[in-house]
Image (cartoon, rainbow, N blue to C red):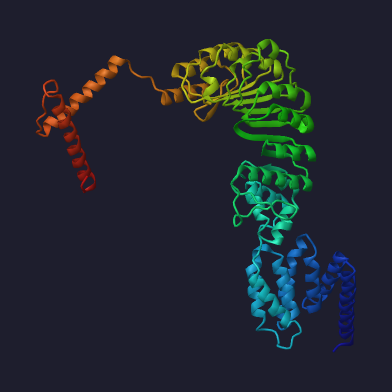
Amino acid sequence: MNPTKKKDTMKNNWNIQDNIEIGMTQFYEGQIQDAYTCFTTALNLDPNNETALTFRAKAALQLYDHRRNTALEDIELALKINPFKGQLYLLENQILLAHHDKYQEAIKRLQKSQFKIFHNDPDIRHIRKLVKELKQKQMNYVVQMPPEVIHTIFTLLPLRSRVQCLAVSCQWRNTLSRIPDLWRDLDYSQQQEEVVIGNDDMMMMNSHRSTVTTPHYWEASIAASLDRFMQWLDIRKLTVPLTMNIVEKLIKRRPELVEVSFLGGMVTIDPLVLQLVMREIGSTWRKVEFDSAIKPFIFYHAASMYCPELTELTIHQGHLHHNMPNSVAQLLRPIPTLTTLCLCHCNFSTMFTIISQICPELTDLTMESSDQLMYMTMDFYNMLRKASKLKRLTLRDRFPKHARDLIEVIRVKSFEWLDINNFPLTREGILGLVEVMQSGILKCYSRTFCMDRPEARKTLKQLIDQKQPVHPPHHERDQQHYQGAMNFMELLRSTGREIPDEEEDEEGFHDQMNLALDDLAEEFYYAQYGGVW
């Protein structure tokens, strides 16, 4: 060999070994990027160096950038150079497991490696044990996802299902419990049938345990569950029945709730309990919903004093203080922050006279159910006129009605949004509404129309003609019915049937007509489908 060439070869070997030794030192000291650079330099001099390939794969596995993708390529090249080394197969398995979509491939490759390495390899027992463990273990793809994705998925589940997911495995429990935002929204509206209290820091629900059916036990279970959640983290949104046990826990823990929804059905909430809860924890409420019978005047009075941040209110099944005169109701303090109000299944039409006083900043109003809309008086429409900042109005009902009073309101007051999609109006009523509403958005027939655009108004009128066509006068309809009956009689006579006179034998006339209809239907079915009717 040429002495000069031999000298260059020895120099390259020294450079390769030096880079590998320096890289290994940096790797074990935690300087992963510098180690990766040294191994790359060594591989540039000798692309088939097994040691450099192995350690560069180990370094790339700890890097969280594009260089991590080179780990599998390096280890596969190292296995081509030395396919009998168990340590390389273990490293290959570790790299494949880092990719969530290559779990099954990792098991298959590791299983095949048992027949390639020598029986006296020091890693053979570890490989066999690892293959057995990987086969018995199921891959938890869910808990391997980013916390943001897990939060998005599991918030679609009800609270009971989320808590049941904690019992799937220790890995699921540890992953889900480390996402606090997943447990800040507690909804106990569906927990009345199966609620079981566990022994850990959080309430556990298990369908294999005994089912809770008694109201008292159900109430105690929810109170205990809520108490444990409040010990664990800060709750932001809560849906819960307002009972004495739950009130006691809320006052004890004083959570800073932002959204609350109190359940109860037709059971009236004790006004004293309601005021007590609002005084103790209502200072942070912004959105409140009562799905139970309450006395709204007491609530308004307490909210004006104890809920300075209340912006949205929904009341279901509210009823009026029948013994409270209007002169006393006029003394109620306003709630200056309340901008959104929704009244559903309520019956207190006399409150319309003071609603503009209680809610001076009201911008969004929703009225739902026929209990209040069927019996609307002029007080309701006068309230709409007085609410100077009201811009969005939603009406929902089941019975058709005219829109004369509503049209008069829109003549003097414009709305940015008017929703009558579930508020059936007569044809004349909706046409009159279209004529007077010259701006804003109108929602009807499950579509939205911008009323300041001529093409949208034209489309809406065509839709009205399609959905609610003009009915012909009574005399025209009678003439159409008579003509249809005559045509049917001619059809029957053409089949050779004897039809008695209706005036002489009314019963026989109707019997013959029914038999004729059955025969015609059977003939049609046979001709159409080739079978018997």
Q: Quadrant of the C terminus?
A: top left
> Does residue 208 lie above or below 520 as drawn?
below
* Nearer the observer, 480 or 400: 400
Q: Residue at x 72, y 65 (%)?
A: 98
Place of residue 40 in the rendered image (x, y in percent of width and height, measured from the top left): 82, 70
Q: How many marks?
A: 0
> Does residue 242 lie above or below 80 as drawn?
above
Residue 363 shows in the view: no
* Nearer the observer, 266 or 12: 266
Q: Residue at x 67, y 25 (%)?
A: 340
Q: Residue at x 25, y 22 (%)?
A: 481
Query: Which image quadrant is residue 190 in?
Result: top right
Residue 529 shows in the view: yes
Q: Is residue 70 left or right of residue 294?
A: right
Query: Which image quadrant is residue 173 in?
Result: bottom right
Place of residue 62 in the rendered image (x, y in percent of width and height, measured from the top left): 80, 65
Q: Is residue 231 left or right of residue 349?
A: right
* Nearer the observer, 124 or 324: 324
Q: Is residue 174 left or right of residue 1?
A: left
Place of residue 456 in the rendered image (x, y in percent of width and height, measured from the top left): 53, 24
Q: Is residue 439 left or right of residue 84?
A: left
Place of residue 398 in the rendered image (x, y in percent of width and height, measured from the top left): 48, 26
